[in-house]
Amino acid sequence: MKLTRAELTILFTLALVQFTHVMDFMIIMPLSPQLMRVLSINPQQFSFLVSSFNIAAGMSALAGVFIIDRLDRRRALVFNYMGFVLGTFSCAMANTYETLIISRIVAGLFGGMSSALILSIISDIIPAQKRGASMGIVMSAFSLASIVGIPVGLQLAQWFDWHTPFLVVGSLGLLVIPLALKFIPPINGHLANLQPFNFKQPLQNVFNSTAKIYSLVLTACLMFGWFIIIPFISPYLVGNVGFTEGQLPFIYLTGGAFSILASPLVGYFSDKFGSIKVFYVAITLSVIVLFLLTHLEKVPMWHALIITSLLFLCSGSRMIPAQSLVSKSIDPATRGSFMSFNSFVQQTSSGIATLIGGSIMVRTANGSFQHYEILGYIAISFSLLALIVIRKIK
């Protein structure tokens, strides 16, 4: 089944929301060499800077479990997105490590519910038979952020300073708000049979089937296994592989190019051949790439770019079939609360993984980093565990 023009308009609007959200979240990681140098912080302090956004977003998503299914989804999305844009501008104004952490917490608090709302809107509007392709379109925002947003942001940081990318993302957000109000329709059909508020009911809805529980475990495995290595790619490539800070945009440019071409295909294959089969192929490839990346030594830049590009490709190729399968296992009346709790698991898992990764990584006196291969083995273990868990989701 083909997507209609109205469905495509909504999906592209949601992709723009996702694009700016991903830009704000991701830009902090490739800026790590500059931030460590300018703010005089170590890997542990940097990991807290990254995880502060995740943990704040997780707490926001947890609060959303109790209210998200009692709200019009468009209104909730626009309100949270406006707060997120405000938090992004505050990052652009921060001048110290402490004020930057506070700004990241503000952005995370408002951004935490956005992912759950986007997934809920897709699931409410798009029929199940077209959901894989729909997820592929919205997930391509990650690739677009990588191929365009982050390289441009890093270049702006090189020309000016690290504040500039946040200023640009916040400005883009101001343009997206009226588009969301115009093209996303009110979504309130789930409010027709709204019951009186019951504090326990939302959590009971989240845990009332084994499929939902395994879906949450799958999310935790995927996010923990990924974010224990992702925040430290840039400093590792600069400190150990021989990249310069000016060469870092090439990682995201080539990786995003691979991903933006592959995301729609992965969504199509998930609909045609089944999400589990596509997921198995993606995880197998990711295990190989994770091992190669975390054992990388000084090599020519093109060699390292092949490995990092495959890593970006694997990221979307895992998440698209996984999210498509999870969305089909949730009933519409409780979809928002479950997706919000799923976002809580996603954000807190990635935040905890980043903190653990930062505590394991050690920077030596010459600027190189040790123990990245240990993080790789942890990531591989969680990826393999995900292969077992996904078979349990019906």
Image: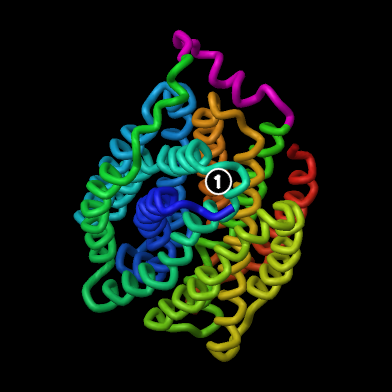
Q: Secondary structure at mark 1?
A: helix
Picture layout, residue 5 above or below residue 195: below
Residue at the spot of label 1? 352
Residue neighbourhood size for the residue with mark 1, other residues' Cα within 10 Å, grouped as few (<14), some (14–19), many (≥20):
many
The type of colouring in the image is rainbow
For this rendering, which residue is in front, 251 or 281? 281
* x, y percent for residue 384: 76, 55
- Say which residue appears at 54% left-offset and 31% top-offset: 335
* x, y percent for residue 104: 34, 48
The range drawn in magenta is 194-210
> Residue 357, can we see it?
yes
For this rendering, which residue is in front, 352 or 247? 247
Using residue 191 as the reference point, say whether residue 304 is left or right of it: right
* x, y percent for residue 342: 56, 37
The mark tally for this picture is 1
- Say which residue appears at 47% left-offset and 24% top-offset: 190
Picture layout, residue 309 above or below residue 359: below
Using residue 12 as the reference point, say whether residue 159 is left or right of it: left
For this rendering, which residue is in front, 318 or 110? 318
Q: Is residue 197 magenta?
A: yes
Q: Is residue 381 magenta?
A: no
> Residue 56, can we see it?
no
Which image quadrant for residue 212? top right
* x, y percent for residue 298: 59, 86
- Say which residue appears at 53% left-offset and 71% top-offset: 261
Picture layout, residue 235 above or below residue 169: below
- Say which residue appears at 42% left-offset and 46% top-offset: 52
Q: Quadrant of the C terminus?
A: top right
Q: Amino acid at mark 1?
A: Ile
Which image quadrant for residue 376? bottom right
Using residue 358 as the reference point, say whether residue 110 is left or right of it: left
For this rendering, which residue is in front, 253 or 365? 253
